[in-house]
C-alpha cells in the first residue's frame, strides 16, 4: 500500500496539472511557440513560427475563431516566413482589457505594439472575417509596419460593408450588451455549429476550439462587443483618407465583400474554398498568401 501512495505522490509532484487557462487555450501545436506578450493594457496570447529573420506574416482571426483556425496555414508559411498569429483582444487566451466594446483602432494599437515588441519588419497582414477591421485600421494608421494588407471574408465598415454584410452583422451590432451572451449560455456548441455551418471547421477541431474559448466567462459578450463597435469603425473610416499600402482581397469562391469594400485591390481566389478558406483549403490559402508576400 505504501508503494502505491509513494507512486501517487511522485506522479502528483512531477506531472503538470492543466490550468483553466491552459484548457481554454487548447493543446500546443508542434512547430509553433505560444507565449503571452504585454502590449500595454492587455496581454496578447500569440503563436509564432518560422525563421526569426524571415519576412513577417501576421494572420488575424475572425468570429467565432481563435488563432488556432490558422494553425495549418501558419505551419505551411513558417517554412520560409516569420509567422505571427495572435488571439485578438478578448478572444481565445488574450485578455479582454479594460476597454468596453473596443473598436478596430484599439485592436490595431495592440497589433502595432505587438509588432514593436517582437521587432518585426514591415509585415504582410491577413485579416479574416472580423479580423479584417483591425487589419485595415492598422494598415491605415501604421503603413510603416504593414507592407501589404490582405482581407479575407471580411470588409471595411463605412466603405460599403453595411450594405453587403450578412444580416447577423447588423443584428449583433444592435443587440444590447449581454443579451446575446445570456441567450447562448449553455448552448455554445449548438449555436456556434449552426453559425459556422462548415464541415471543415468541425473536422479540423476549430469548432471545439471556438466552444472552449467562447464558453469562458465574459468571452462571448466580448466578441459581440466588436460588432457593437462597428458604427464607430465606420465613422472613422469614412473620415479617413485613402489606404497607403497595397491591398489584396483573398476570397474563397467568387469575389465577395473584401473585394467590394477595397476598391482597386487585387483579387486572389482560392479554388474550392468557402468563407473559411483557411479551413477548407489551408495549403491553397498558404500558397496564395505566399505568392502575395513574394511580390
Image (spheres, rainbow, N blue to C red):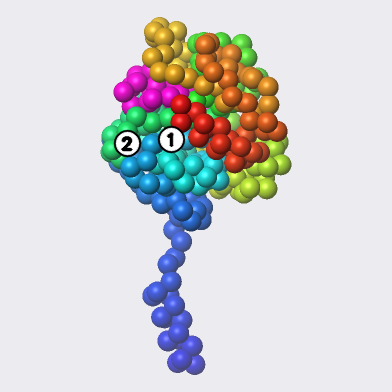
Residue located 41% across and 50% down the image = 34
**CA neighbours of label 2 inside 10 A, class few (<14), some (14 to 19), many (20+):** many
Q: Is residue 169 above or below residue 22?
A: above
Secondary element under disc 2, as helix, strand or loop, is loop
Residue located 42% across and 41% down the image = 81
Look at the image and tell me whether residue 23 can be seen: no
Secondary element under disc 1, as helix, strand or loop, is strand
Q: Verify whether residue 132 appears in magenta.
A: yes
Q: What span is colored magenta in the figure?
A: 130-149
Which secondary structure type mostly characterizes the magenta part of the structure? helix
Q: Quadrant of residue 239?
A: top left
- What numbered label is drawn on residue 34? none
- What numbered label is drawn on residue 120? 2
The residue that mark 1 highlights is: 58
Q: Is residue 230 above or below residue 26?
A: above
Residues at marks 1 and 2 touching, judged by CB atoms closer than 8 Å: yes
Amino acid at each position: 500500500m505504501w508503494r502505491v501512495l509513494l507512486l501517487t505522490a511522485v506522479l502528483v509532484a512531477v506531472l503538470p496539472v492543466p490550468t483553466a487557462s491552459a484548457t481554454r487555450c487548447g493543446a500546443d501545436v508542434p512547430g509553433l511557440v505560444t507565449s503571452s506578450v504585454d502590449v500595454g493594457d492587455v496581454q496578447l496570447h500569440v503563436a509564432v513560427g518560422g525563421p526569426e529573420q524571415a519576412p513577417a506574416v501576421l494572420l488575424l482571426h475572425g468570429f467565432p475563431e481563435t488563432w488556432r483556425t490558422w494553425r495549418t496555414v501558419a505551419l505551411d508559411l513558417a517554412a520560409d516566413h516569420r509567422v505571427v498569429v495572435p488571439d485578438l483582444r478578448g478572444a481565445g487566451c488574450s485578455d479582454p482589457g479594460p476597454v468596453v466594446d473596443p473598436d478596430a483602432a484599439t485592436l490595431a494599437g495592440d497589433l502595432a505594439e505587438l509588432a514593436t515588441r517582437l521587432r518585426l519588419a514591415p509585415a504582410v497582414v491577413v485579416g479574416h472575417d472580423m479580423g479584417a477591421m483591425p487589419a485595415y485600421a492598422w494598415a491605415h494608421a501604421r503603413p510603416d509596419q504593414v507592407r501589404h494588407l490582405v482581407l479575407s471574408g471580411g470588409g471595411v465598415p463605412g466603405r460599403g460593408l453595411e450594405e453587403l454584410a450578412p444580416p447577423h452583422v447588423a443584428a449583433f451590432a444592435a443587440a444590447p450588451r449581454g443579451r446575446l451572451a445570456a441567450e447562448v449560455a449553455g448552448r455554445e456548441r449548438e449555436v456556434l455549429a449552426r453559425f459556422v455551418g462548415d464541415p471543415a471547421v468541425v473536422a479540423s477541431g476549430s469548432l471545439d476550439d471556438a466552444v472552449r474559448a467562447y464558453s469562458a466567462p465574459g468571452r462571448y459578450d466580448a466578441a459581440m462587443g466588436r460588432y457593437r463597435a462597428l458604427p464607430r469603425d465606420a465613422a472613422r473610416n469614412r473620415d479617413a483618407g485613402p489606404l497607403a499600402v497595397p491591398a489584396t482581397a483573398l476570397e474563397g469562391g467568387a469575389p465577395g465583400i473584401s473585394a467590394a469594400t477595397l476598391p482597386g485591390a487585387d483579387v486572389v481566389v482560392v479554388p474550392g474554398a468557402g468563407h473559411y478558406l483557411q479551413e477548407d483549403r489551408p495549403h491553397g490559402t498558404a500558397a496564395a498568401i505566399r505568392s502575395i508576400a513574394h511580390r
